[in-house]
Amino acid sequence: MAEHAIQQKSLLSGRVAYFTESVIREMTRQAMLHGAVNLSQGFPDFPAPEEIKRAAQEAIAADVNQYAITWGAKNLRNAIARQMQLWQGVAVDPEREITVCCGSTETMIATLLAVCNAGDEVVIFEPFYENYGPDAILSGAKPRFVKLRPPGTPDGEWAFDERELRAAFHNHTKAIIVNTPNNPTGKVFTRSELALIRDLCVEFNVLAITDEIYEHILYDGTRHISMAALEGMRDRTITINGLSKTYSVTGWRVGWAVAPPAITDAIRKVHDFLTVGAPAPLQEAGASALGLPASYYQELAEGYRKRRDRLVPVLTEAGFRCFRPRGAYYVMTDISAFGFASDLEFVKYLVKDIGVASVPGSSFYNDARDGAQQVRFAFCKRDETLDAAGERLKKLRAR
C-alpha cells in the first residue's frame, strides 16, 4: 500500500502545468530548421557598437573576470543612477536602490519572487510579453489580465478600458506590470494613462513594476515617461531595464531593477540565490555604454524608424493589416485576410512554405482565441534581411 502511494506521487511541480516553453524561441528554432528569414525573435542581426565591444574586451584583458558585487558593479550602478536622473529626472541612490541581474528577464522574476505571496494577484495588460504570466505563477501569484484592444485604423493606438482596469484592482492585488514601450504591440503609454494607473496603485496600495527595456526606441515624436517620475509613485515603483535592446547586446544578459531601499533589499536576496551575479566584464562595458552621447540614442531611434517604415509597407502589400508601432521594434498584424483557421496554422505555413518566421499572436494572450488572427514580426534586422523577407512574402501575396 505504501509502495503504491509512493508510485502515485507526482515528481513535478504543479506550477509548470500552467505554461509552455517560449513560443518565441521555438520560432527561432523553426527558422533555423527551415532556412527561413527570422523575423520572430527580437535580437538584432547587426553588430553592437564598436566602443561597447571594445570596453568589454578591455575589461576581460584587465582581468575583470571574477565575481562582481552580487547586486552589481559600482561603476554600472553609478551609471544607472546618473542616467535615471538625466533621462527621467528620478534621483536614485546607487548603493541602496539598484540591483543588477542577469538580464531584465531574471530581474522580473527576482522582483516578483521578492514581493509576491500566495494569494496575491498581479495585473498584466494583454497582449503581453510571454514571460509575465509564467513569472507571476512561479512567484505564487495569480495573473489578472486586462485587454489592450487593437486600434480601428493602422495609425490608431492600442487602448484599454478604464472600467475593466479598475475592476482588476482589489484587496488581493499586489502589483501591476506596465511594459512601455510595449512588446508586442509597440504601444507607448501616455502620461494620462500612467496617471490613471498611478491613481489605482495609490488607492489600492499596489506596486507598479515597469519594464522599460525599449525606452530609447521611439517614433513619431512619442516620449517615454517612467512611472517612477510621476508624483506619488517614487516609493511604490520598481523600474526594470537593461542593456539588451538599446545597445544590441541581447546575449550579454545584464539588466537591473531600480526600487526603494526596502524592496531593493528583498530583490537582492532573491537575486543572490538565483544567479549570484551578472557577468563582471560586461557590467563594466555596460557602464561605458550608458555614457554614450545623446546622438547615439537619436540615431538608434531613427535607424529603427527606417526599418519599421521599410517592413510595414511590404507586409501591407502582402495582405497583412498592420498596427503601426509607436515604440519598440515589433509590428503586430491581423492575418484574417488570408483565411487560415488559426495563427498557429498560419505561422507554420509561413515558415515552411514561404520562408519567413514570425510569432503567433496567441502566445501573447491568456486565452489563445484572442490572438488567433494575429502575428508579430520583429524588424530589428539589417536592410538585407528585411528585403529578403519581403521577396519571400511576395509568394504569399501571389497565393
Image: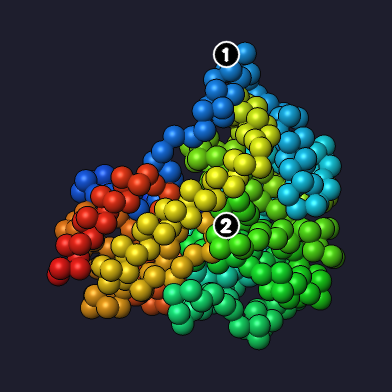
How is this picture coloured?
rainbow
For the C terminus, the quadrant is: bottom left
In-front residue for pair 394/4: 394
Q: What element does badge 2 sit on?
A: loop
Q: Looking at the image, is 262 positioned above or below residue 152?
A: above
Contact (Cβ within 8 Å) of mark 1 with mark 2:
no
Locate residue 11, reporting x and y percent.
Answer: 45, 52
Q: Looking at the image, is 245 positioned above or below residue 305?
A: above
| Pointer 1 residue | 61
| Pointer 2 residue | 218
In-front residue for pair 163/86: 86
Residue 316 located left or right of residue 58: left
* Residue type, numbered disc 1: Ala
Instruction: State which mark lies toward you, 1 or 2.
Output: 2
Locate residue 351, reporting x and y percent.
Answer: 24, 56
The part of the image, by quadrant, that contains residue 352 is bottom left
Q: What element does badge 1 sit on?
A: helix
Q: Residues within 10 Å of mark 2 (few under 14, many from 20)?
A: many
Q: Is residue 256 visible?
A: yes
In-front residue for pair 319/21: 319
> Which numbered tag is attached to residue 286?
none
Residue 229 located left or right of residue 210: right
Locate residue 375, reporting x and y percent.
Answer: 36, 66
